[in-house]
Image: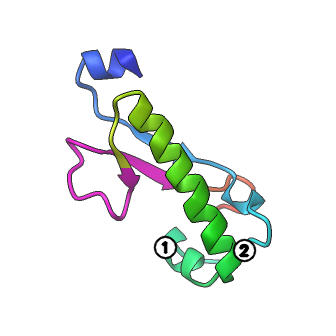
Amino acid sequence: MKLLRQRKTPFIVALNKIDRLYGWKKIDNNGFRESLAMQNKGVQSEFRTRLERTKLLFAEQGFNSELFYENKSMSRFVSLVPTSAHTGE
């Protein structure tokens, strides 16, 4: 990450294994944002808790980060992209 910063190389970060959140329900043919909105409140809360923890870890390394669909400045914030290789979401 330090090398990327030194070279001013933009990058994104995949937050893999979202399907491992306890209670996550796979929703076919849906984007992450819509799928998250359809999960129960406990799953949504757990995702937000983990997201904030991840953002804090990036901040400790000197990087601002934001969920990809909330990122208004790609040049100032690293985009965090939730994914699941297992379910294809």
Whether residue 74 is in magenta: the answer is: yes
Question: Mark 1: which secondary structure?
Answer: helix
Q: Residue at x 60, y 54 (%)?
A: 50
Q: Position of residue 66 (x, y in %)?
A: 37, 53
Circles 2 and 1, Cβ within 8 Å, touching? The answer is: no
Q: Which labelled disc corresponds to residue 26?
A: 2
Mark 2 or mark 1: which comes first in sequence? 2
Question: The N terminus appears in which quarter of the rendering?
Answer: top left
Q: Which amino acid is tagged 2?
A: Lys
Q: Position of residue 4 (x, y in %)?
A: 34, 21
Viewer-nearest residue: 9 or 61: 61
Q: Main secondary structure of the magenta part?
A: loop
**Res 89 seen here:** no
Q: Which residue is mark 1?
A: 33
Question: Mark 2: which secondary structure?
Answer: loop
Q: Residue at x 53, y 54 (%)?
A: 51
Q: Residue at x 68, y 83 (%)?
A: 40
**Which residues are drawn in magenta?**
66-81
Whether residue 1 is in magenta: the answer is: no
Question: The C terminus appears in which quarter of the rendering?
Answer: bottom right
